[in-house]
Image: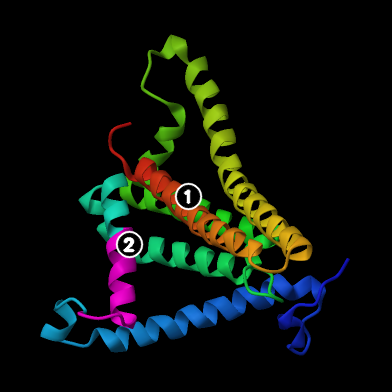
């Protein structure tokens, strides 16, 4: 059954391109939000001082503090310069998720193409960071610890296991995100059809929590993958 979606009012957007239109709308929103945030930040002493009221600057400070604290906890102080990337991943997924709570909208993260694309981005970026940190020696991480030559079969086994493990990661991220978003919005839609007044409020709150948690978990796992890739403790 095909339901109406506001993005279909955009010329050329058919049912099969709803997720693309939603992703573009969210991306444009985030770009405008970022520009407004940069303007609100100001310069000099004004940029350093914390916001004393609810504002775009205050929202950015809250998001930045949250992502920085999480990054430092997972990666350490050296992970601070990855904060913009982690914040971008978190906001893109979170804003996409909550669009599904708006009547007549479908989140881009409800589509497997979108979630696989974000999962592949995470997969590519942590491997690039690993290569940048270790050079070609990064590939040794896939072979496990150094062993005597007569145990040559163990590194081969480790290589196979690591390749499978790394290959599965983007798809596990994609399936987890897509599955939870589909399930959450299916439950919300069912209760809206059954009891359209008062009762759905609780499920909207639950849906908002799920939207946040899925963005949080995806970002946290990406942080862990980056931490493992750049670690020197292997």
Q: Say what secondary structure mark 2 lies in.
A: helix
In this figure, which residue is indicated by the disc labeled 2?
Answer: 83
The residue that appears at 30% across and 89% down in the rendered structure is 39
Q: Is residue 166 left or right of residue 35?
A: right
Colour scheme in use? rainbow
The residue that appears at 72% across and 57% down in the rendered structure is 186
Q: Quadrant of residue 53?
A: bottom left
In the image, the segment drawn in magenta is 52-67
Dot 1 or dot 2, earlier in sequence: 2
Query: Which secondary structure dominates the residues rendered in magenta?
Result: helix
In the rendered image, the quadrant that contains the N terminus is bottom right
In this figure, which residue is indicated by the disc labeled 1?
Answer: 217
The residue that appears at 49% across and 17% down in the rendered structure is 154
**Label 2 CA crowd tier, 10 Å (few <14, some 14–19, many 20+):** many
The stretch drawn in magenta includes residue 143: no
Q: Residue furthest front?
A: 198
Relative to 161, residue 76 above or below: below
**Do we see residue 96 in this rendering?**
yes
In the rendered image, the quadrant that contains the C terminus is top left
């Amino acid at each position: 059954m095909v339901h109406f979606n506001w993005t279909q009012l955009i010329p050329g957007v058919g049912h099969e391109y709803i997720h693309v239109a939603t992703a573009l709308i969210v991306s444009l929103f985030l770009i405008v939000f970022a520009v407004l945030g940069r303007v609100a930040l100001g310069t000099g002493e004004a940029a350093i001082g914390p916001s004393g009221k609810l504002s775009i600057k205050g929202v950015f400070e809250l998001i930045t503090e949250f992502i920085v604290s999480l990054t430092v906890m997972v990666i350490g102080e050296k992970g601070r310069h990855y904060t913009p990337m982690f914040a971008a991943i978190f906001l893109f997924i979170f804003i996409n998720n909550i669009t599904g709570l708006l009547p007549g909208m479908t989140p881009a993260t409800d589509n497997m193409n979108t979630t696989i694309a974000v999962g592949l981005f995470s997969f590519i970026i942590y491997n690039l960071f690993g290569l940048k940190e270790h050079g070609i020696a990064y590939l040794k991480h896939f072979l496990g610890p150094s062993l005597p030559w007569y145990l040559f079969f163990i590194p081969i086994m480790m290589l196979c296991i690591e390749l499978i493990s790394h290959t599965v990661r983007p798809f596990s991220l994609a399936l987890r995100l897509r599955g939870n978003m589909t399930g959450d919005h299916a439950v919300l839609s069912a209760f809206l059809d059954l009891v359209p007044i008062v009762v759905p409020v609780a499920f909207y709150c639950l849906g908002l929590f799920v939207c946040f948690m899925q963005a949080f978990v995806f970002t946290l796992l990406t942080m862990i993958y980056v931490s493992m890739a750049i670690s020197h403790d292997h």
